[in-house]
Amino acid sequence: MKRLLASVLVFSLFVFLFWNIFKNWQVIVQQKWNLNGIDVALVLVFLSLAYFVNIFSWHMIVKALGASVSFQSNFRTWVLSNLLRLLPGSLWQYPARVYLLTESGVSKMLGITAVLVEGLLNLSLGATVVFISLVFWQLPPELERYKGILWLFVFLPVFIFVNPKIATTV
C-alpha cells in the first residue's frame, strides 16, 4: 500500500510539473533564451553542490541529535521529501521528512526537532547572508527598522546551542 501511495505521489508530481509547463508554454516560447555551454555547466555544478551540501547538513543534524541513520537513508529521506516542495502549499516536505525518518526507526520527536533545527539554521544563514551583503549595499530606509530581527536570526542558534540545558540535549 505504501509503495502504491508513493508511486501515485511521484506520478502526481510529474503530472503537476508537466501541466504547469503546458499551461505556460506561450511564456516559455516567447522567452529569449541566451545560453552558452559554460554558463549552463557552471549552474548545474553549483546547483548540484548546493543540493549535496543541504543533504549532508541534514545528515549531520540528524546524527548530532543522536539518531543512527545511514547517509544513504538520510539521502533518500531528504530527496523524496524535497520532491514534495513542488506540490501546492510548499510545506509538505517537512511532515514527509519526519514520516520518512520514523520509517528509519527515528522517533517523531527527534524528526520534528531535526526539521526545526534545519529551519533555524536556514533562517540564520539567510540572515547572515543579508548582513554580509549589507557591507556592500544598504538596506532600504523603510526596512531599516527590521535590522534587529535580522540580528536575532543571526544569533538565535548561538543562544540556543550555548544554553546548557539545550546543548546537553543536542
Image: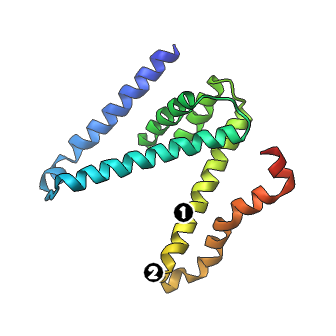
- Picture quarter containing residue 23? top left
Write the residue at 47% across / 35% down.
79
User: Residue 145: x percent and y percent?
Assistant: 60, 81
Crowdedness of circle 1 by 10 Å Cα count: few (<14), some, many (20+)? some
| Residue holding disc 2 | 136
Residue 18 vertical placement versus 164 (above, below): above
User: Residue 170: x percent and y percent?
Assistant: 77, 45
Q: Amino acid at mark 2?
A: Phe
User: Residue 78: x percent and y percent?
Assistant: 52, 36
Q: In the image as oriented, which residue stretches furthest toward the top?
A: 1
Tell me, for residue 126, which label it has, or none. Answer: 1
Write the residue at 56% across / 27% down.
73
Mark before the other along the chain sequence, 2 or 1: 1
Q: Is residue 125 left or right of residue 109?
A: left
Write the residue at 68% across / 69% down.
152
Q: Which one is in front, 153 or 67?
A: 67
- Picture quarter containing residue 20? top left
Separation of marks 2 and 1 at Cα, in angstroms: 16 Å
